[in-house]
Amino acid sequence: MEHIPLRHAPGPASLEAIAALPKKKVTSEMFGSDGKAECSICMAEVNKDEEITELYCCHWFHSQCIGKWLSSHNACPHCRRAI
């Protein structure tokens, strides 16, 4: 399958916007029915009280994972809402 670049894709998020995103600790309410939670970028399990970054759309990720994503995209990887 040929890769066709998107002409109107948003560019990277600014460093200031990334730094301003709220950090929070993982709570048991964030776990699924199986009692687990994972960063959907790297697919690694997250533990209670681990620090994550939450976007304004309420989707959350490891800070390092979302930082890398936002260095080339200006939107949530789940819902595509701009940050």
Image (spheres, rainbow, N blue to C red):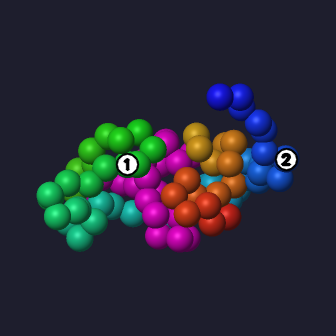
Q: Which residue is mark 1?
A: 39
Q: Secondary structure at mark 1?
A: loop
Q: Amino acid at mark 2?
A: Arg
Give the farthest residue toward the right.
7
Q: Position of residue 7 (x, y in %)?
A: 85, 47
Give the farthest residue toward the top.
1
Q: Secondary structure at mark 2?
A: loop
Total numbered labels: 2
Quarter residue 5 falls in: top right
Quarter residue 69 falls in: top right
Q: CA distance from mark 2 to mark 1?
A: 29 Å
Q: Position of residue 37 (x, y in %)?
A: 26, 54
* Dot 2 or dot 1, earlier in sequence: 2
In this image, 28 relative to 2: left or right? left
Stretch of the chain drawn in magenta: 49-67
Give yes or no for residue 62 being in the magenta stretch. yes
In this image, 72 relative to 38: left or right? right
Residue drawn at point x = 76 percent, y = 36 percent: 4
Does residue 42 show up? yes
Quadrant the N terminus occupies: top right
Q: Amino acid at mark 1?
A: Cys
Q: Nearer the viewer, mark 2 or mark 1?
A: 2
Q: Position of residue 47 (x, y in %)?
A: 23, 50
Q: Position of residue 41 (x, y in %)?
A: 45, 44
Q: Which residue is mark 2?
A: 7
Give yes or no for residue 51 being in the magenta stretch. yes
In this image, 55 relative to 26: left or right? right
Q: Residues within 10 Å of mark 2 (few under 14, many from 20)?
A: few
